[in-house]
Image: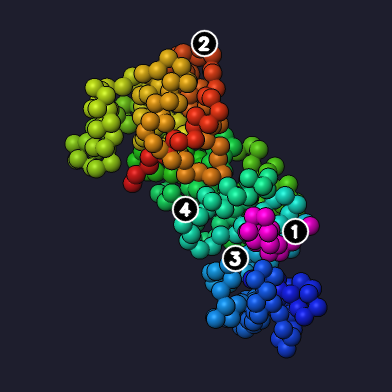
């Protein structure tokens, strides 16, 4: 950690701390040591016999350097402020925005719980990831959980070696090649406090996609008896249908493949079986799916998918009736690799 209290009770930054003085953790009040050296960034660390209820994991040089860099760039930011009501301590606090620079792996359930806790107290969580989480053609569910959404998925990354904040945003998803990303550097003179302005114009690129080619891809995977596609076909078989017998529009490309990939076919199939959004949502909830995207509104995405189905199927004249409050809460993203 980068902040500790001295004997007078004052908060002192690690870079300004003196080796001979005593310091204590602002959260648990137990003694901490000032760590300095050529191979490690200057920081405070708990003594081995002491375990803090908030600071429970070691910090990497990348994490320490990133917090210092963000603190210098973010106007009116505070380092490691403990929020007693939440029992959490974000890396930085800027008014009602909690900034978390994540460099190490953490459990998805913990990420969701921390994010939900911030949001329930009306804080806006801003997750920025380190080198480990740079998006690739294939993504883990944890990588996807760090993504935000504004017309397309996007993710914030801080390269501490280059001292550069970057914005990765999804260009497209292809059933053969996976995810394709574009990267945009955030200029040094940009006011990061108003960071949302950087994503207002992001859009997915148009790319080559053929519905017939996607059907052939699905047929090949079924012929090869790949488990994921057999599970998909089993869903259709139980409902007296087949994954290859859907209307042609169901095999169209969609920016919502980011959330569901091939399982988007299930949502489109259930749309065909229902006359209204209420019934569609009810059928989805019976699948007992869990929403694993804590930074994206599930209700907004489901509404957009329903409207996309209306447009693709030529039923746009139908009115959209929003689902009842709480009816989306039990839906899961049944995504399996």
Tell me residue 175's x, y (percent). 36, 38
Of marks 2 and 4, the one in the foreground = 4
Q: CA distance from mark 2 to mark 1?
A: 49 Å
Residue 54 badge: 3
The CA span between labels 2 and 4 is: 40 Å
Distance of label 4 from label 3 (alpha carbons):
18 Å
Could you tell me how far apart the alpha carbons at marks 4 and 1 are, in whole angstroms? 27 Å
* 10 Å crowding of disc 4: few (<14), some (14-19), many (20+): some
Residue 33, above or below 85: below
Earlier-in-chain disc, 2 versus 3: 3
Residue at image x 74%, y 85%? 21
Residue 189: image quadrant is bottom right
Q: Earlier in the sequence, mark 2 or mark 1?
A: 1
Residue in view at x 36 percent, y 18 percent? 273
Q: Residue furthest top?
A: 317
Q: Could you tell me which residue is drawn at 48 percent across and 59 percent down?
A: 106
Q: Which residue is mark 4?
A: 108
* Residue 328, magenta (yes or no): no
Q: How far is disc 1 from disc 3 in space, using C-alphas?
A: 20 Å
* Labels 1 and 3 touching (C-beta < 8 A): no
| Apparent side of residue 4 relative to residue 291 in the rendered image (left or right) | right
Magenta residues, dominant SS class:
loop
| Residue at which label 2 appears | 317
Q: Quadrant of residue 178?
A: top left
Q: Secondary structure at mark 1?
A: loop
Q: Residues within 10 Å of mark 3 (few under 14, many from 20)?
A: few
Helix, strand or loop at disc 3? loop
Q: 223 or 17, which lies in front? A: 17
In the image, taking residue 229 as reference, residue 201 lies left or right, namely right
- The stretch in magenta equals 76-91
Mark 2 / mark 4, whichever is N-terminal: 4
- The mark lying in front, picked from 1 and 3, is 3
């Amino acid at each position: 950690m980068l902040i500790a209290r001295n004997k007078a009770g004052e908060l002192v930054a690690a870079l300004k701390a003196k080796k001979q003085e005593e310091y204590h953790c602002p959260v648990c009040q137990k003694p901490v040591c000032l760590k300095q050296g050529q191979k490690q960034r200057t920081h405070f660390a708990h003594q081995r016999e002491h375990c803090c209820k908030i600071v429970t994991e070691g910090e990497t040089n990348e994490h320490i350097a990133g917090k210092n860099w963000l603190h210098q760039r973010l106007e009116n930011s505070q380092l490691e402020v403990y929020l007693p009501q939440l029992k959490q301590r974000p890396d930085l606090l800027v008014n009602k925005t909690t900034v978390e620079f994540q460099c190490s792996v953490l459990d998805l359930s913990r990420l969701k719980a921390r994010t939900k806790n911030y949001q329930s107290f009306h804080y806006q969580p801003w997750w920025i990831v380190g080198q480990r989480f740079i998006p690739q053609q294939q993504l883990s569910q944890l990588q996807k959980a760090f993504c935000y959404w504004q017309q397309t998925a996007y993710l914030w990354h801080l390269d501490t070696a280059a001292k550069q904040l970057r914005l990765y945003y999804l260009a497209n998803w292809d059933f053969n090649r996976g995810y394709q990303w574009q990267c945009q550097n955030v200029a040094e003179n940009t006011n990061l406090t108003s960071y949302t302005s950087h994503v207002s114009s992001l859009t997915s690129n148009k790319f080559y996609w053929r519905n017939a080619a996607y059907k052939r891809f699905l047929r090949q995977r079924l012929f090869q008896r790949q488990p994921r596609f057999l599970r998909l076909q089993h869903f259709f078989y139980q409902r007296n249908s087949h994954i290859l017998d859907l209307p042609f529009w169901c095999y169209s490309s969609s920016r919502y493949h980011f959330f569901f990939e091939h399982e988007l076919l299930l949502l489109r199939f259930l749309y065909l079986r229902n006359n209204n959004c209420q019934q569609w949502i009810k059928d989805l909830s019976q699948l007992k799916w869990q929403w694993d995207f804590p930074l994206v509104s599930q209700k907004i995405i489901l509404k957009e998918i329903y409207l996309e189905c209306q447009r693709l199927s030529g039923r746009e004249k139908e009115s959209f009736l929003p689902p009842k409050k709480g009816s989306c809460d039990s839906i899961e993203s049944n995504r399996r690799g």
